[in-house]
Image: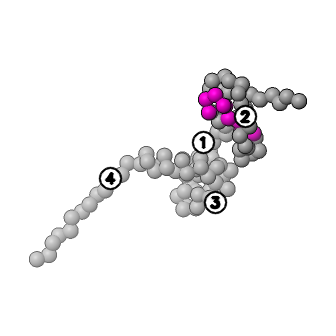
């Protein structure tokens, strides 16, 4: 019995081996020609703007990232990347007022 395996999406080679599973039990493959790891028929979940708005409000409430991920159904990694990008986009300007020296 010969199992059909997908060809490599990078180089098109058919020298493919199974290489474990991802979080939802889909099989992961590795190309022996170029070394690329991939999943057949990957599904990318798009986070809508309503969910992002909810995440922004929950961040202002200082709820933990794990709690926000559970409540909104997004992955912890996606949420951490989202927060890091949001934080990096904020312009920081420190306004320092010199204190008067007393003689």
Give the secondary structure at mark 3: helix
Category of crowding for the residue at label 3, using alpha-carbon neighbours closer than 10 angstroms: few (below 14), some (14–19), many (at least 20) = few
- Residue 6: x percent and y percent? 74, 28
Q: Which mark is residue 93?
A: 4
Kindly identify which residue carries mark 3: 67
Kindly identify which residue carries mark 1: 49
Give the secondary structure at mark 2: strand
Q: Which mark is residue 39?
A: none
Residue that lies at the very extreme toward the right in this rendered image:
1
User: Which callout, 4 or 3, points at the residue further toward the start of the chain?
Assistant: 3
- Residue 36: x percent and y percent? 62, 33
State the separation of the CA atoms marked 3 and 1: 19 Å
Q: How is the image coloured?
A: one colour
Is residue 76 shown to the viewer in this render? yes
Q: Nearer the viewer, mark 4 or mark 1?
A: 4
User: Which callout, 3 or 1, points at the residue further toward the start of the chain?
Assistant: 1
Magenta-tinted stretch = 27-35
Kindly identify which residue carries mark 2: 17
State the separation of the CA atoms marked 3 and 2: 38 Å
State the separation of the CA atoms marked 4 and 3: 31 Å
């Amino acid at each position: 019995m010969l199992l059909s395996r997908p060809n490599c999406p990078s180089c098109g080679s058919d020298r493919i081996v199974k290489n474990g599973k991802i979080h939802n039990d889909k099989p992961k493959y590795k190309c022996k020609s170029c070394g690329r790891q991939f999943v057949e028929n990957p599904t990318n979940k798009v986070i809508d703007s309503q969910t992002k708005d909810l995440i922004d409000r929950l961040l202002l409430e200082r709820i933990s990232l794990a709690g926000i991920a559970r409540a909104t159904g997004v992955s912890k990694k996606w949420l951490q990347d989202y927060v890091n990008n949001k934080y990096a986009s904020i312009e920081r300007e420190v306004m320092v007022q010199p204190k008067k020296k007393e003689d």
